[in-house]
Image (cartoon, grey):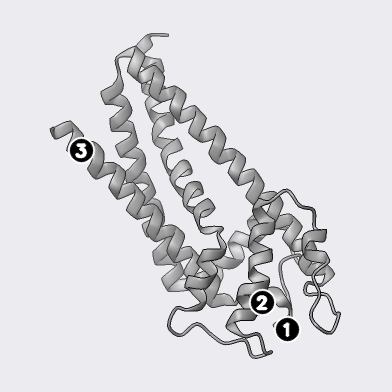
């Protein structure tokens, strides 16, 4: 096969890797306790009818978020207790958090592999004389990201419940991700929280993709 075939194939790989890197990088950025403080202070965020204050949500939410990206076992959450000695998270919640951590850690690994692959492709493009093709592929990947998340945001606006259920059914076993309204996870992360997360991931991914497209086009004009 000719070199042009491999370069065309590589350019399409660059375009496909671009949304993967952008989206997963945004998701990793948002797995941050600072986001909780921002979200809980947004206008109209619902109060917890079972008594959690904003400070309670921030306190327990810090442990839940940091658990997802640290090296601790589930005892990091399982050992937490309220003032009356009852566990903060029940067994069903702990089982789900283990599943979420596995998914998050896998996503981080995919992000790292994709970033290394993109770096190697960039070095090949630089040394192989097809750097313009590499940049054009990045632009295509940026547009792909925008079209993808424009559709997701529209779907969230029109029917958030459908996409929320579909997401969980795709990544978790049925029945392992549903809880009572009195459970800690629902009290910390009501439906409004997850709807906003979809908007944040989508909005930031689109902004990152636009920045990539405009930046590359500006450099090409220069």
Please name the residue shown 71% across and 77% down the image: 184
- Residue 72 visible in the displayed image: yes
Q: Quadrant of residue 204?
A: bottom left
* Residue closer to the observer: 182 or 2: 182
Q: State the separation of the CA atoms marked 3 and 2.
A: 45 Å
Q: Quadrant of the C terminus?
A: top left
Label 2 neighbour load within 10 Å: few <14, some 14-19, many 20+: some
Q: State the separation of the CA atoms marked 1 and 2.
A: 7 Å
Q: State the separation of the CA atoms marked 1 and 3.
A: 52 Å
- Residue 160 visible in the displayed image: no
Give the label on residue 217, or none: 3
* Residue closer to the observer: 77 or 190: 77
Please name the residue shown 42% across and 8% down the image: 1
Q: Is residue 218 above or below residue 102?
A: above
- Image check: 94 left or right of 163? right
Tell me residue 70's x, y (percent): 68, 51
- Image check: 159 left or right of 58? left
Label 3 neighbour load within 10 Å: few <14, some 14-19, many 20+: some
- Image check: 24 left or right of 109? left
Give the label on residue 186, or none: 2
Tell me residue 183's x, y (percent): 74, 79
Tell me residue 32's x, y (percent): 55, 59
CB of mark 1 within 8 Å of CB of mark 2? yes
Q: Is residue 207 above or below residue 62?
A: above
Kind of element beneath mark 2: helix
Which residue does the numbered mark 1 point to in the structure image? 182
Please name the residue shown 29% across and 49% down the image: 210
- Image check: 7 left or right of 111? left
Label 1 neighbour load within 10 Å: few <14, some 14-19, many 20+: few
Tell me residue 90's x, y (percent): 82, 72
């Amino acid at each position: 096969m000719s070199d042009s075939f491999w370069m065309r194939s590589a350019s399409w790989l660059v375009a496909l890797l671009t949304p993967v890197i952008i989206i997963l990088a945004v998701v990793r950025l948002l797995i941050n306790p600072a986001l909780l403080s921002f979200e809980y202070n947004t206008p109209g965020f619902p109060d917890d009818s079972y008594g959690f204050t904003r400070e309670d949500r921030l306190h327990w939410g810090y442990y839940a978020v940091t658990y997802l990206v640290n090296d601790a076992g589930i005892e990091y959450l399982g050992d937490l207790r309220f003032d009356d000695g009852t566990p903060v998270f029940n067994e069903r919640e702990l089982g789900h958090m283990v599943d979420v951590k596995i998914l998050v850690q896998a996503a981080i690994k995919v992000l790292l592999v994709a970033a290394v692959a993109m770096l190697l492709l960039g070095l090949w493009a630089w040394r192989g004389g097809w750097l313009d093709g590499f940049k054009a592929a990045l632009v295509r990947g940026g547009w792909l990201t925008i079209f993808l998340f424009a559709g997701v945001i529209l779907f969230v606006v029109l029917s958030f419940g459908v996409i929320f259920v579909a997401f969980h059914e795709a990544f978790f076993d049925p029945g392992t991700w549903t809880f009572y309204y009195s459970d800690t996870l629902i009290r910390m992360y009501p439906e409004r929280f997850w709807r906003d997360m979809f908007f944040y991931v989508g909005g930031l991914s689109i902004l990152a993709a636009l920045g990539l497209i405009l930046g590359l086009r500006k450099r090409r004009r220069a």
